[in-house]
Amino acid sequence: MIQIVSHTPEENTKFAEANKNSGDYIHYVEFNPTYEALCRAYELDVKSHEKQDTKAAEKSDDTEKTVSWIDLLAYAAAKNGGKFGKNALSCVDEAAESLESGTSLEELTEGMEYFNYYEKAYTAVLGGMVGTFQEETEDGSMKEQYGLMAYSPIAEGFDYSSGDDFGSARSYGYNRPHLGHDMMGLIGTPIIAVESGYVEALGWNQYGGWRIGIRSFDRQRYYYYAHLRQDRPYAEGLKEGDIVTAGDVIGYMGHTGYSKKENVNNIEVVHLHFGMELVFDESQKESDNEIWINCYPLTEFLKKHRSAVTRDEKTKEWSRTTKICISEVEKQKAQ
C-alpha cells in the first residue's frame, strides 16, 4: 500500500542518503519546491538565456553563462534538506549569481553531498518543461524562442478552482491516499497535454473513469488525466500510441469513475484529476513502489502558460489556436 507522508529536512536527508549510492535507480522523491521558488528559478533561467542571446547578437567576446532552473532548485534543496522555507529564494539567487559570474556547477556544489540526488530527482520532474522551440506568430511564420514548453492542464479561458489536496483520504474500493491534484470546473472544459509524449493508456478505469495516460519521451514522467466526460471523453481520433504535442487538446472534463461499469458518472463534483508519476525503472510502474509527486505548486506555476483554444462549430471539437514546433516531437514522429 502506498503511503503519503511529509518528512522533516532530517528525514529527507536520510532518503537522499539512501538514494545517493543506489546502484540502479531512485526509489523515493518528495518534490517540495514552492510556487515562488519555481517562478524565481524559471525567471533566472530565462533571463540568463536572453542575456546570452543579446551578447551573441552583438557578437561580443564577453559571452554570458546560462543557468538551469533545475540546478538552481536542486542547489536550494541540497542546502535545506529538501525543504523550501524562508531562505529558499535567497539560495536560488545565490546559485544563479555564482554561476553567471563564472563559477562552475562543480565548484558551486563541491562538498554538497546530496546535490546529485536532487538534480536527478528534479530533472525527472521538470526535465521536459523548459527549452528552445518554435511558436507561430500572428503572420503565420514560426519564431524560435526559449522558455516554457509545458502547459497548464486546463485550456485558456476556462475557469477552475483547486487546492492542495495531495495525500488526502479516498475510500472507494479501499482506503488510500489521493495521488494527484483535483481541478474543479465545468463539464466539457478542454483538457490539455502538459508535456509532449506518447499516449500510453486510454480507456476506462473504475477509479479514474475515462482517463488518459501520457508518457514523456524520456519515459521518466507519466501524466495521468482522469474523470473525463461521459460519452465523448477524448479529443476526436485520439488513440493509444499517438504522439501528442504539449498544448494539444486531449480530452474534456467530466465526472466519470468509481464504477466497474463503463461510462458512469459516479463522481459527485466535476473535475480533472491530474497526476504525475516518476518512473526511474519500469518495475516501479503499476506497483506498490510507485512515486507520485504533489504537483499542486507545479500546476499553479503552469497557470502562466495556458493553451489558447478554438471550437469547431460543426464537430463541436476544441483545438489549439497557436502551433508550436518542438524538435523532440519531430524526431519522435520521424522514427
Image (cartoon, rainbow, N blue to C red):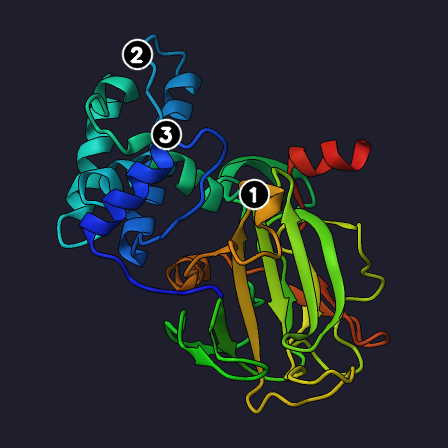
Mark 2 to mark 1 CA distance (whole Å) = 37 Å
> Could you tell whether 14 is left or right of 220 in the image?
left
* Residue in the foreground of this view, choosing between 82 and 97: 82
Residue 295 in view of the camera = yes
* Residue in the foreground of this view, choosing between 159 and 108: 108
Decide: few, some or many residues near mark 1? Use Cα within 10 Å; few <14, some 14-19, many ≥20: many
**Disc 3 residue type (three-letter):** Asn
Decide: few, some or many residues near mark 3? Use Cα within 10 Å; few <14, some 14-19, many ≥20: few
Image quadrant in which the C terminus is located: top right
Q: Which of marks 2 and 1 is in front?
A: 1
Q: What element carries label 2?
A: loop
Q: What element carries label 1?
A: loop
Q: Do the residues labelled 2 and 1 touch (CB within 8 Å)?
A: no
To which residue does mark 2 refer?
A: 62
To which residue does mark 1 refer?
A: 220
Instruction: Specify the label residue 185 is tagged with.
Output: none
Q: Where is residue 297 in the image (x, y as percent from the top left)?
A: 37, 61
* Residue lying at 79% horizontally and 76% vertically, measured from the top left: 316
137 w.r.t. 177: above or below: above
To which residue does mark 3 refer?
A: 21
Q: Do the residues labelled 2 and 3 touch (CB within 8 Å)?
A: no
Q: Where is residue 207 in the image (x, y as percent from the top left)?
A: 63, 77
Asked which quadrant contains residue 261, the reply is bottom right
* Residue lying at 23% horizontally and 51% vertically, measured from the top left: 11
